[in-house]
Image (spheres, rainbow, N blue to C red):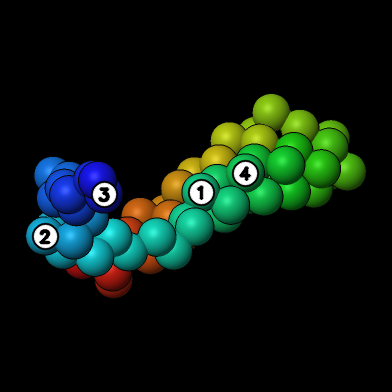
Amino acid sequence: MTPEPTEHASTSSTAEPVNRNGGGVFIALGTIGGAIIGGMMGQPSAGLLAGLALGALIAVLMWWRGR
């Protein structure tokens, strides 16, 4: 006997396609880059926060564009 094919309840086939742009990379790179550039200017904490804010802004804009 062969098993009957079963239908699995999958949300991926019935839901909208998921848009994954990878905006989180800008948060990470902004934070690291800001800390490095801020460190060269003598203000690593301010650079880290500025890079974090810029990376988060870019990630939010990417998310907003994809909606």
Residue 65: percent from the left, percent from the top? 28, 71
Tell me which label, 4 or 2, sits earlier in the chain: 2
User: Which residue is under mark 3?
Assistant: 2
Pointer 4 and pointer 1: residues touching (CB < 8 Å)? yes
Residue 43: percent from the left, percent from the top? 76, 33
- Closer to the eye: label 3 or 2: 3
Report how far apart the C-alphas of labels 4 and 2 lie in the structure.
Answer: 33 Å
Task: Identify the residue shown where x is 49% and y is 57%.
Answer: 22
Tell me which label, 4 or 3, sits earlier in the chain: 3
Q: Nearer the viewer, residue 59 or 67?
A: 67
- Closer to the eye: label 1 or 2: 2
User: Which residue is under mark 2?
Assistant: 14
Say the numbered circle drawn on residue 24: 1
Q: Nearer the viewer, residue 37 or 15?
A: 15
Looking at the picture, does residue 48 appear above or below residue 56? above
Task: Identify the residue shown where x is 51% and y is 49%.
Answer: 24
Q: Amino acid at mark 2?
A: Thr
For label 2, the crowd category at 10 Å Cα-Cα, with few meaning under 14, some 14 to 19 and many 20 or more, is: few
For label 3, the crowd category at 10 Å Cα-Cα, with few meaning under 14, some 14 to 19 and many 20 or more, is: few
User: Which residue is under mark 4?
Assistant: 28
Which type of secondary structure does the marked residue at label 1 adopt? helix
Report how far apart the C-alphas of labels 1 and 3 lie in the structure.
Answer: 46 Å
Residue 49: percent from the left, percent from the top? 58, 35
Q: Amino acid at mark 3?
A: Thr
